[in-house]
Image (tube, rainbow, N blue to C red):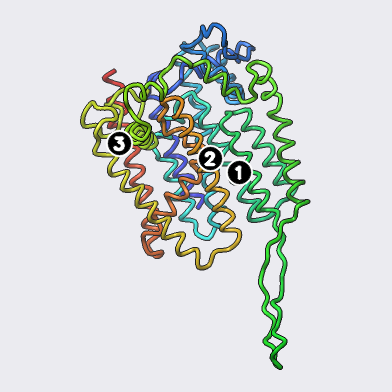
Amino acid sequence: MKRWLAILGALYLLLAAGFNLATPYGEAPDEWAHVDYVKQVAAGRLPHLDLLTRKDRQTGYEAHQPPLYYALCVPVWKAATALGAREAAAAKWVRIISILLGGLGLLAIWGLAGEASGWTDPRVPLLATGFAAFLPMRLAVCAAVTNDPLAELVATLALWVMVTIVRGGVTVRRVLLLGILLGTGLLTKMSLVILFPVAALALLLGSRRREKREAAASRKKRRAPAPRTSEWLTLDGATFARGLAISFGVALAIGGPWLARNYVLYGDPLANRAFTWYFADTRRYEWFREQGVDFFTYLGQLVLPVTFDSFWGAFGHLNRPELFMGALNRDYPPTSWVYPILLMATLAAVAGCVVWYLRARRQATAEGVAVGLVLGLATALVVASFLRFNTVFFQAQGRYLFLALGPISLAMAGGWLQLTPKRWWWYTAAGGGVLMLALALYALFGVVVPGFARA
């Protein structure tokens, strides 16, 4: 297991380094704005959105973000600039922080997939990790200056702890760790606030108390059958309340000052209204509606196709067809020979998940059902938040779904494995990993390198 993880990690680092070298500075989404934030923190300032003048629209629009990722980048930025590196070169050095965070994210996905599947088969977490390691869009994101890799890491670690709570119960150590991760999320990216309701559900399900109860024997018969025992689960309300108070209290102790700062600056702890106001004159869904595009056409022909393409891999600022994989024309989104194949692979995984559910239902345990509820709620909240965002702004970027990449990777791996006999699972896991590696190599050398070379 450790050897295969090391191989996956080494290949990931090589590919991410390749994406770093091949992607010009500023050609990753919002990279200029993220670097501007790093520069301000390096100068000893915390930026904020200027809602009155909006004078920093070109590079200052990430100023509402929490500061943790940027603080991690400052030492590398200062070292690079002290050695004489210009902004573009220094930014490429700072990208190494994102690459390393992405590597830690792979370990978190491995742990989450293993814990969620009960560590019953090593091929499930290995294939899930391989899927994430070689996902082209994730490689591109992890080779950019952006807080997305840290947000994905924190989300996956938090879900791992939640699954551990569901399976092993509520302990002081676990709820303290959960609280630290929830608070770290508040200092990383405000979209991680969705972890709080998921954590509450995990604590609720982890606060169950097992009791053995005997079925009443029939008194009508002279020879009553032997009493039957069954396992019942009841909620331990005190344990739940204590776990909720500790974890949420620790989280607010860590992230609360940032929420208070947002409230003072913007009148909104999450800074959502400030962000919406700051971009009041950018293209929104209303613009499409005014052009005669109804909501379902907007969703079905723009948001969902571009989101699917950019989840797997569409590079740059999503405005150049040649940076979509397998593009055959210059439409938007372009016709492609790659994404239909990936759609079939996705549908196969969905079908496999249905098979997985039907097989597991016969011998489902309370813990297994609870784990499914926690991961399902997390994924549903990420998707719902993404769709809601796109009802305001047209932002069909699949990378926003990476907050749920842990559960998604588990579903893809488990679904593919379920479609083959169990004696073939090593071949399925190896084949899936090799095909994902081939996709990553094609994305790098067949799309990114020539695409940016023509820029």
Q: Quadrant of residue 424?
A: bottom left
Q: Quadrant of residue 416?
A: bottom left
Q: Residues within 10 Å of mark 1 (few under 14, many from 20)?
A: many
Question: Could you tell me the amino acid type at mark 3?
Answer: Tyr
The residue lying at 39 percent from left, 52 percent from top is: 350
Q: Which residue is mark 3?
A: 442
Q: Mark on residue 381?
A: 2
Q: CA distance from mark 2 to mark 1?
A: 9 Å
Question: Could you tell me the amino acid type at mark 2?
Answer: Leu
Dividing the image into 4 quarters, which one contains the C terminus? top left
Q: Find numbered disc 1 in the image and state the secondary structure of the residue it sits on.
A: helix
The residue lying at 67 percent from left, 25 percent from top is: 259
Which of 166 and 132 lies nearest the eye of the viewer?
166
Name the spot of residue 175 as percent of width and height, x first: 71, 44
Name the spot of residue 395 as percent of width and height, x first: 42, 27
The residue lying at 36 percent from left, 44 percent from top is: 436
Which tag is nearer the camera, tag 3 or tag 2? Answer: 2
Q: Is residue 154 above or below residue 129?
A: above
User: Would residue 9 be found to the left or right of residue 168 on screen?
Assistant: left
Which of 91 and 265 lies nearest the eye of the viewer?
265
Q: Mark on residue 198?
A: 1
Q: Residues within 10 Å of mark 3 (few under 14, many from 20)?
A: some
Q: Residues within 10 Å of mark 2 (few under 14, many from 20)?
A: some
- Mark positioned earlier in the residue sequence (2 or 1): 1
Which of 8 and 429 lies nearest the eye of the viewer?
429
Q: Find numbered disc 2 in the image and state the secondary structure of the residue it sits on.
A: helix
Query: Which residue of the protein is positioned furthest toward the bottom in this rendering?
Result: 222
Q: CA distance from mark 3 to mark 2?
A: 32 Å
Q: Are marks 2 and 1 in contact (CB under 8 Å)?
A: yes
The residue lying at 46 percent from left, 64 percent from top is: 359
Instruction: Mark yes or no: residue 111 visible.
Output: no
